[in-house]
Every structure is written in structure tokens, then in C-alpha cells.
């Protein structure tokens, strides 16, 4: 609802969302693994996996209420302020199993972790998510040739705590399902060996995984602020300089632990626990420059430059990129450059309508209506995390283990024998300190997370097109487009995995070198058909051209 009261433009609103997705997986599966063709011919697998999965209908609800006022204090000064209240209710189940709930979760004492009684909410709903917003705009100069506007703002923005619910509702985890691993049995299975594993706790042959939320989970939130000055350069052009900052707090981060009791006592046999926590933080600061020219005398342009730094303890809330997982009681051990942190970025889009001078009929017929388009993108190198294969630490945490740094060794090697002319130096890293009893690392190595940088990227896309008017509302357009016009080679990021942990001197043959061009790596090297774009349509691919005819009506 909007109200206008003198210099005040007031808005009130409410937003409610209710989702009830249905999980309807295959109720039973059996997968046999053979080490070679001979073992498959003789029916001698090294492992057979059985799984039982139940259907379920989940329930998600979100409520938001806000009020906002835009106050035109004086003609040159406008103040916008408001307040929002957000509630992300704890997820529930309408039918079938619901989310498992954990109790006694404490990163410093995992022995207290246990499964809560059935029907316990996965976490308590937060009702105190109050988010204020304020923005100010002041017109310093009203000269049409030299207008100056100052802007600034601050706001609090809450995120959904349920965004990881899909990962928590793993179909092979209790109470949604159960998985059993059989070894030493011939294939096909005989008798009741092929029976679906029961979805109960405990079960001697079941591999039980506890996927749950921290029972004290709260809604993540971000503080955002900015200040900008916009200066017109004549009637058609403007330059904007902005400072943008953000601080994410209580961000979602997975904690993955495994080990037998007494590491933690969630089950009396063997336990794997993945708990969604609030332990992550992030900080972002950026200087942004933007030049804008409206279409004038056949020329239109938009150019932007950003210098920024993004730092966090996890760049994703999902388990998968193990460098983001909680690996210690103090999650700041992971604090480093964000996975997507590129310090500098430049982009420019420019369109120019080719002018035709004179009244020569032939020249007019050949040249009129042509335009050229240019898009230039350039960015500095993103970070690469150097680590050993996924491994548990002595505290039971499963994470990518980072190495110690070898003094006196350079991090980078240069030369024409390396793709892109640069590689990481494996001799600069060594295993971290190990526990003599278990052989597991005592802690993360002293190399920071995302401590090295890969390759930057530059690309110029060019297009030329001509419009052929047919009628007032109909035209035909011919286009010729060239991507990566200069065929500039852009390399994918070097591999950061040092190899399998615990094998002295074994380093992956691909460590430290780029194994694909950037377009191919972004497409998902070797995974065409699995949802990735073809490298031809990715930024950083080889030069390519396409022609098109478009009919506008």
C-alpha cells in the first residue's frame, strides 16, 4: 500500500511464502562395484551398496513485513528510511519423515553431540530479525552541464536459514533413508541379503549419517553500506565514483565430522555428522568507477572499473568445496580471500552508428544503417586453494588439508614450458605436523586458504550489424558477431590439489599447472552434457564467429 502525504511517500507491505516440495525418490537401489572385468564376469564385487529411501513432503514458510518513507525534505535533499521484519520459520514436514534434529552440538566438545527425539524442530525460529534501512540523496549542483549528486545508504539484510535444507534432506541419511555397504558377498545377492536396509537407529550394517542443523542456528545477515558521487559531464555523459562495503555475519558454513566413539556419541557404532552452522563471516570493500554516455552523435558507451577485496571464512554454505568446511573450533583458521575474489575488474560496452556523409546514392545504399558493437572484459587472477585430498584432522573434522610453507622456496615458477607461462612450485609446500598415533594432521598447515593466484582473463567481443527498414514497424537486421576477436589465450586456473595425503613424496602430476583453457574449465572440463555450457559459449573460449538475420516486428 502506498500513501502520498505532502513531501512523504509512504509504503507498507507484507510478503508471505509457503512452499511444500515433495521428495519422491526411487525407494530402493542396489549398486555393485567391480574392480575389473574379470571380477564382474565371476560376480565378485568388492562392494555392494543398498539403500532405502522414504517419500516426504516438506514445509517452508517465510514472512516479511516492511514500512518505508521517502521524504523530500527540500527540493535538493531526499531521505529514504524504513524498517523490515523477516521471519524464516524452521522447516517442517507435512507427510513422511521430517528433518533430523541434533542436540548437544558444540565444536569444542563433540562428545556431547546426539540425536534429538523424533518431532524436535531442527532449530528454533528466530523472531528478532529487525532490518533498518536508510538512504540519502543530495543534489549539490543543478547546472544542466555540471550536475553533482551525492548519495549514501546503509541497510541490514537477512538471509534464509533454510537455504541448506536441500542438502540436509539427503535421501541416504536418517530419517529419510538408510544405506548399507556389503563386502565379501557374491553378485547377484542371494536370499535376504538384498533386503532393503531398515531405516532405524542403530543398525549393525547400516552406514548412518546425521545431517542436521545446529540447534542454535540463527538467520544469517549482511550489513551493507555505500557512498557515491555522480558528476555529469555535459548533458549526455556522467561519471560516478562509489565506495561499497558489506559485512556478512552468522553466514552458513558446513561442519563435517566422522569417527567412532568417544569422538562423539551420536550412535553406539560409527558416526558421520554434517552440521550446518552459523560460524562463517565475510567482509567486502570496493571502489567502483563508472562512465556512462547516452546515445549522442551515434556513440553510446558504458565503462566500469572495480577495485575490490572480498575476505571470508567460507565462500559457500554447502558441503562440496571442502576448503569452505569448518576445520577447527576457531573458524577464522579459514579466513582468507574469497573463492571468487578478483581484485580488479574492467568492462566496457561501446556502440557506434557509422555516419554517412554526402548525398551519393550508391554510398548511401551501401553504408547507411551500419553499427558496430564492442564489449571488452578484463579481470585479475582469482585465488586458488592449495591442499591435499579430503582428509580428517585429529579433531574429527573432514576438510581439505592445507600444507606448511617451505622457507626459501618461491611459490611460482615461470617459463614457456608451463601453460600460460606460470605454475605453482610443489617444492614450496610440505605436509603439516602429524599426530604420531593416528597419522592425521594435528591442524591445518600455515599456508592461508586461497593463498595463491592463478591467471587473469581478457576478452574483446566485436559485432557489426545493419538494419534494413521494411515498413514503419518492421525491419530486418543482419549481424556478424566475433567473440574473442583477437583470439587472446585465456587459461583455466592451475590445479591446487597436491595429491593424496599420507603418501610421502607423492604429488599430483597436474598440481600447479593449468590443464584447460578458461572457456573449457568454466564449462566443466570433460562434463559436456551434464549441464555445463559448451566452451564455445563461455567467456575465455577461442575466437569464434556467428552470423544472423533477425526480423523485428
Image (cartoon, grey):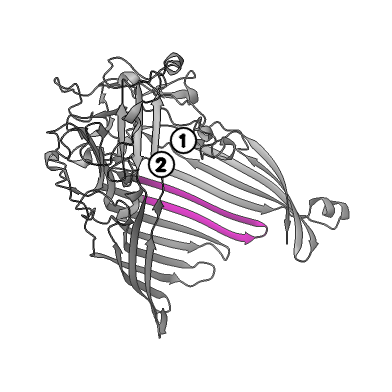
Q: Which residue is drawn at 14% across and 39% down?
A: 110
Q: Is residue 484 visible?
A: yes
Q: In this view, does 183 lie to the left or right of 302?
A: left
**Mark 1 surroundings within 10 Å by alpha-carbon count, few (fewer than 14), some (14 through 19), many (20 or more):** some
Q: Do the residues labelled 1 and 2 touch (CB within 8 Å)?
A: yes
Circle count: 2
Mark identifier at residue 305: none
Quarter holding the N terminus is: bottom left
Q: Tell me where residue 351 appears, x and y as whole percent.
A: 64, 52
Q: Tell me where residue 502 appears, x and y as whole percent.
A: 26, 19
Please tell me in which quadrant of the rendered image residue 553 appears: bottom right
Q: Is residue 320 visible?
A: no
Q: Residue 307: within the magenta?
A: yes
Q: Who is closer to the viewer here, 363 or 325? A: 325
**Mark 2 surroundings within 10 Å by alpha-carbon count, few (fewer than 14), some (14 through 19), many (20 or more):** many
Q: Judging from the image, what secondary structure is the residue with disc 1 in?
A: loop
Disc on the earlier residue, 1 or 2: 2
Per the rendered image, the range of residues in magenta is 286-309
Q: Judging from the image, what secondary structure is the residue with disc 2 in?
A: loop
Q: Tell me where residue 99 appears, x and y as whole percent.
A: 28, 50
Residue at numbered disc 1: 456
Residue at numbered disc 2: 342
Q: Who is closer to the viewer here, 378 or 25? A: 25
Amino acid at each position: 500500500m502506498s500513501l502520498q502525504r505532502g513531501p512523504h511517500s509512504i509504503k507498507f507491505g507484507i510478503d508471505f511464502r509457503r512452499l511444500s516440495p515433495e521428495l519422491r525418490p526411487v525407494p530402493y537401489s542396489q549398486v555393485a562395484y567391480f574392480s575389473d572385468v574379470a571380477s564382474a564376469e565371476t560376480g565378485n564385487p568388492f562392494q555392494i551398496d543398498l539403500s532405502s529411501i522414504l517419500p516426504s513432503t516438506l514445509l517452508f514458510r517465510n514472512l516479511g513485513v516492511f514500512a518505508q518513507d521517502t521524504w523530500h525534505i527540500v527540493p535538493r535533499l531526499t531521505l529514504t528510511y524504513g524498517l523490515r521484519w523477516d521471519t524464516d520459520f524452521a522447516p517442517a514436514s507435512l507427510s513422511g519423515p521430517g528433518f533430523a534434529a541434533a542436540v548437544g552440538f558444540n565444536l569444542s566438545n563433540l562428545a556431547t553431540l546426539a540425536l534429538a527425539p523424533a518431532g524436535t524442530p531442527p532449530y528454533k525460529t528466530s523472531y528478532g530479525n529487525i532490518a533498518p534501512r536508510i538512504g540519502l540523496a543530495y543534489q549539490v549542483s543543478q547546472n544542466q552541464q555540471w550536475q553533482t549528486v551525492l548519495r549514501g545508504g546503509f541497510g541490514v539484510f537477512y538471509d534464509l536459514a533454510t537455504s541448506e535444507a536441500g542438502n540436509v534432506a539427503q535421501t541416504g541419511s536418517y530419517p529419510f533413508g538408510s544405506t548399507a555397504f556389503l563386502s565379501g558377498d557374491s553378485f547377484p545377492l542371494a536370499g535376504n541379503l538384498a533386503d532393503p536396509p531398515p531405516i532405524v537407529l542403530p543398525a549393525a550394517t547400516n552406514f548412518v549419517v546425521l545431517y542436521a542443523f545446529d540447534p542454535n542456528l540463527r538467520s544469517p545477515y549482511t550489513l551493507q553500506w555505500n557512498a557515491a558521487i555522480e558528476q555529469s559531464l555535459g548533458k549526455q555523459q556522467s561519471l560516478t565514483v562509489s565506495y561499497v562495503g558489506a559485512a556478512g555475519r552468522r553466514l552458513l558454513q558446513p561442519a563435517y565430522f566422522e569417527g567412532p566413539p568417544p569422538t562423539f556419541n551420536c550412535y553406539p557404532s560409527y558416526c558421520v555428522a554434517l552440521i550446518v552452522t552459523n560460524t562463517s563471516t565475510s567482509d567486502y570493500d570496493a571502489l567502483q568507477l563508472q562512465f556512462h554516455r547516452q546515445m549522442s552523435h551515434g556513440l553510446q558507451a558504458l565503462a566500469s572499473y572495480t577495485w575490490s577485496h572480498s575476505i571470508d571464512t567460507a565462500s559457500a554454505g554447502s558441503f562440496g568445496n571442502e576448503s569452505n568446511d569448518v576445520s577447527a573450533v576457531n573458524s577464522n583458521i579459514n579466513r582468507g580471500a574469497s573463492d571468487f575474489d578478483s581484485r580488479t575488474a574492467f568492462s566496457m560496452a561501446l556502440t557506434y552508428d557509422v555516419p554517412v556523409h554526402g548525398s551519393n546514392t550508391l554510398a548511401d545504399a551501401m553504408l547507411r544503417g551500419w553499427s558496430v558493437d564492442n564489449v571488452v572484459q578484463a579481470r585479475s587472477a582469482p585465488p586458488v586453494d592449495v591442499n591435499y585430498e579430503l582428509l580428517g584432522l585429529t579433531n574429527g573434522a573432514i576438510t581439505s588439508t592445507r600444507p606448511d610453507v617451505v622457507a626459501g622456496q618461491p611459490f611460482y615458477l615461470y617459463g614457456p614450458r608451463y601453460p600460460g607461462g606460470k605454475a605453482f612450485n610443489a617444492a614450496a609446500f610440505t605436509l603439516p605436523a602429524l599426530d604420531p598415533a593416528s597419522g592425521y594432521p594435528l591442524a591445518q598447515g600455515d599456508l592461508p586458504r586461497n593463498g595463491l593466484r592463478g591467471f587473469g582473463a581478457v576478452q574483446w567481443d566485436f559485432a557489426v550489424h545493419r538494419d534494413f527498414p521494411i515498413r514503419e514497424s518492421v525491419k530486418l537486421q543482419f549481424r556478424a558477431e566475433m567473440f574473442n576477436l583477437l583470439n587472446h589465450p585465456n587459461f583455466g586456473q592451475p590445479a591446487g590439489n597436491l595429491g593424496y595425503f599420507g603418501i610421502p613424496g607423492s604429488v599430483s602430476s597436474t598440481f600447479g599447472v593449468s590443464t584447460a583453457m578458461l572457456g573449457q574449465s568454466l564449462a566443466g572440463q570433460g562434463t559436456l552434457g551434464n549441464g555445463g555450457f559448451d566452451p564455445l559459449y563461455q567467456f575465455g573460449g577461442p575466437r569464434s564467429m556467428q552470423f544472423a538475420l533477425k526480423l523485428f516486428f
